[in-house]
Amino acid sequence: MIKALLLFSKGLDSLLVKEILERQNIKVETINFGTCFFNGEIDITEDHLKIVKNPKYGRGQGMNPCRDCHLLMLKKAGEIMKEKGYDFIATGEVVSQRPFSQSKEQLLFFDKEANLEGLVLRPLSAKLLPETIPEKKGLIDRNKLYDISGKSRKKQLELAKQFNIKDIPMPAGGCILTDKEYSKKLKELLFINPEFDSNDAKVLTKGRVFFKDKTLFIITRNEKEGEKIKDYLKRGDIFLEPQNFPGPSVLIRDFTNNLNVDIMTQTAKDYLIKYSKKVPKDFEIKIQKYEE
């Protein structure tokens, strides 16, 4: 049986590709990559962090290294394809849907760089692209593929109706690296600590973020966030919690190994009081240094 490995985003385009291939009696296995910046079933965070810190092919408007990320996932899929004997890789990509990373020239460039020339089939736009190896071999009928291009989803919605796909997922950005506010925080983190890890990157999403003298302060916004941030505490962190009044928690994380504990703790107290609504005169704050 002919087997295809589908890079599966769980969006409409990849759902359509799965249907298109299965209608040609091709066995489809899906693969979904994830990192600390977007969800997925196979974690590639370690390799992905390297390209976030130092992308070879530049970034988008935020900290998103879309081209490098795309290439990384293709390479990973190529390794799996060869290891497990799939005939080709398929994706739900549409020519010109994303001008930064999905122009015709860019897609073919990715295939070449990943050493996968002719082995990546994009059924939704196949007729706009050179014939692939599985098409030349007769493993798939090119006449039953499509020539969709651009950002409009009109043709995809027509196909979904034709294929009786009723539960249509909404388009979503997915990757937090495209978020301008988060990107600003991550850029500052990269500047003060080029060796940041996935924990450092994820904790930036958990509250109000401030940097001072290469020290990170995170002030939680509510009780739920205060509890959640405890999952990210690591050795050397200092954590402040109000004891006899409602208020935010504060995490202090130093990247200099030369932290003036007294000064930074006082700064954290000031933040805590500033963002609390009612602070009694005899307020109590628990201060804990995390040693695990």
Image (spheres, helix red, strand yellow):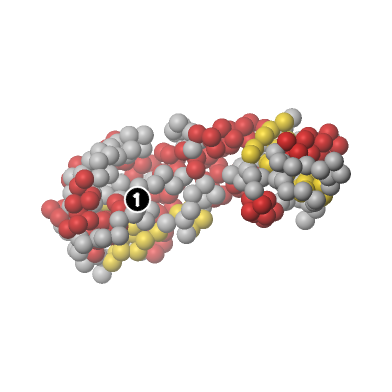
Mark count: 1
Amino acid on which the number 1 mark rests in the picture? Met
Pinpoint residue 71: horizontal percent, then vertical percent: 41, 44
Residue 119 appears in the figure: no
Residue 152 appears in the figure: yes
Say left or right for 16 vs 84. Answer: left
**86 vs 76: above or below:** below
**78 vs 63: above or below:** below
Pinpoint residue 73: horizontal percent, then vertical percent: 43, 49
Asked which secondary structure carries label 1, the reply is loop
Tell me where residue 106 sits by quadrant: top left
Identity of the residue drawn at 17% across and 58% down: 162
**84 vs 214: above or below:** below
Identity of the residue drawn at 37% across and 56% down: 10
Name the quarter where the C terminus is drawn. Answer: bottom right
Viewer-proximal residue, 288 or 6?
Answer: 288
Pinpoint residue 175: horizontal percent, then vertical percent: 46, 45
Identity of the residue drawn at 38% across and 53% down: 9
Tell me where residue 282 sits by quadrant: top right
Name the quarter where the N terminus is drawn. Answer: bottom left
Q: Read off the residue under disc 1.
A: 170
Viewer-proximal residue, 175 or 141?
Answer: 175
**90 vs 96: above or below:** below
Few, some or many residues within 10 Å of mark 1 (<14, 14–19, 20+)? few
